[in-house]
Image (cartoon, coloured by chain):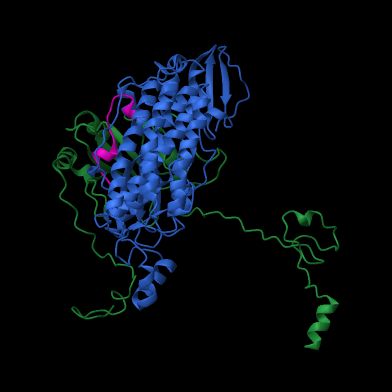
Chain colours: A green, B blue
Amino acid sequence: MGAAPGQSTPGTQTVPGQTPQVDTPPPQPEHPPYVQTLLDRFGEALSIPKWNFADGIPTVTVSPEQLRQVCLWLRDEASPRYDFLAELCGTHWPAREAPFEVTYIFHSLERHERVRLKCSTGGETPALPSIVDVWPAANWPEREIYDMFGVSFDGHPDLRRILMPNDWEGHPLRKDFPLGEEPVEFYRPPAGGPASSLPGSELDRPASSSAGYGAIAPPVVSEAAEAQRTRE
Amino acid sequence: MVMLSEHRTESGTMILNMGPQHPSTHGVLRLLIELDGETVLNCMPDVGFLHTGIEKTMEARNYHQAIVLTDRTDYLSPPSNNLSYILSCEKLFGVEKEIPERAQIVRVIFCELARIASHLIWLGTHALDLGATTVFMYCWREREKILSIYETVSGVRMMTSYFRIGGLAADVPDDVADMVEGVVKDMPRRIDDYETLLTKNPIFLDRTQGVGVMSRENALKYGLTGPCLRGSGVPFDIRKVYPYSGYDAYDFDVPYSNEGDVYARYMVRMREMRESVRIVSQAAKRLRETKGAPVKIDNPRVIFPKREKIHRSMESLIHHFKLVSEGPVPPAGEAYAAIESPRGEQATYVFSDGSNKPHRVRFRAPGWFNLQALPNMINDGLVADVVACIGSIDIVLGEIDR
């Protein structure tokens, strides 16, 4: 818009129900000390993403090379220990450079704190290191991400499709995978006479014309009705 | 999926195919069980038979339309699924702190009634699997009363879809407080009845005690949540740890047990039903106190304006039109919202790209993680104990396969 600074731009902000334009993400909360420890320990492998995390869980982006070390550190050395894998899921952002983003949420039962790791991958054969040997709970979620997004996990003991059939082609949750649908088949009563509205009655009616189900029948007009119409 | 051509292996063990259509698998779960005589050497669950692509479908609906799809995941406690999705959306819209008190009370009542109803089905079918047929009928009788409350409030017995982003679809009818109090008054006596039939029943004890043991370490490693984790000695409950919908205002305990066997999980769920009754009775009292209070926020960007306002004010009519035609539009971002469903940590993770449809919705189904631990639970056990273990996990394949 060529609006001068300070001048209101009618039509973009004042229309009711208009999409609120998010130019700058809301300010991130200061990350808690345990995230700072993590950043100090791993340095350049980690970064704080600029993104709107509306749930307030502290988030760190990690490079695929360092993923396993960070996970092991969180489980064995961090204070508090992150002894619980709460969530592991994938997302497809086609416009990004590394379009497949895998999200890990770890929970510490000691202090009930959570931390979220994000790890992205892309290319012809997207792949990430598996963390099944660190957390057995990651087994099925990693298989699901492989199934739904086609991201393979190096070192996974049993990487097979889990929800879709083995011979399925493609990865359904990718954005370029079309959402399938079946056309609705409308029922049209057979030609020849008014249809009864009782359920199942069409089965009893003899086939009065060669037009089968689905053929377009001409409107049936009785002689009496026609005479009535012409009188009027 | 694995196809079998040989049922007898070279080492003399037998591979038994259980399911997908088997009464004790509570849905369509297939298990491949390797047996040496009657001992289970290995077990491999095979899921996906009920995959309907709910997550994919939600990407093609706007935020409001997608609510009805959430009911269909965990079909034994639809209000819990609604709530986790709604909470996640409310975080995205930034309205989670504005939800009126009465809406939160009704949400808590619905979710706790859903917990009781879901545990009743679990109890009935679990006991049925183990040969106790009587409990089954009683459980369904009590569940029916809870479903009548759903019907009075939302018009639907099961798939209620009654919560909205920013509150509720409508206020509850006046007689609901009486109905809820009727259930609260009735349930403790009924739970006593079930316990008379099972808790000290020697056959039930033989089938459950020391069976399917999950140690505390294994339960954590496999990501178990809910009664399965609490049965292994970890008192972890989202309602206490990350209170939502005003759960911190209610007085209740988190039952847990250290044994980690099928019986421990049974005891945890039985005591949980009593705790739920406690919560509902407190909530019903507050429901009477807040009669006439608003049940939705006054934010036309998120939720429909009141009907009377639509008739009188042009602005409200435009808001209504925009919400129906385009749907509410959150800012870009993501939000993870977890609740304690009857089965564990049920969370919905909504990713938004700033359009009127979710970019991705992910259900963190507790059963998805809990079922993974099944082989660990039943290996080296007896084949007859497999049904006891499946029943004690309380799986719902709708949420596992989604």
Quarter of the view holding residue B266: top left
* On-image quarter of the N terminus of chain A: bottom left
**Magenta region:** B228-244
Total marks in image: 0
Instruction: Tell me if I can see residue B74 in this picture.
Output: no
Q: Nearer the viewer, residue B100 or A23?
A: B100
Task: Please say if A214 is above or below B159.
Answer: below
Residue B49 in magenta?
no
Who's the residue at 82% across and 57% down the image?
A205
Is residue B321 toward the left or the right of residue A51 in the image? right
> Which x, y percent locates residue A227?
83, 83
> Which x, y percent locates residue B302?
34, 63
Quarter of the view holding residue B206: top left
Who's the residue at 26% across and 65% down the image?
A23
Q: Nearer the viewer, residue B174 or B351?
A: B174
Q: Nearer the viewer, residue B331 or A202?
A: A202
Is residue B278 toward the left or the right of residue A179 in the image? left
* On-image quarter of the C terminus of chain A: bottom right
> Which x, y percent locates residue A111?
19, 35
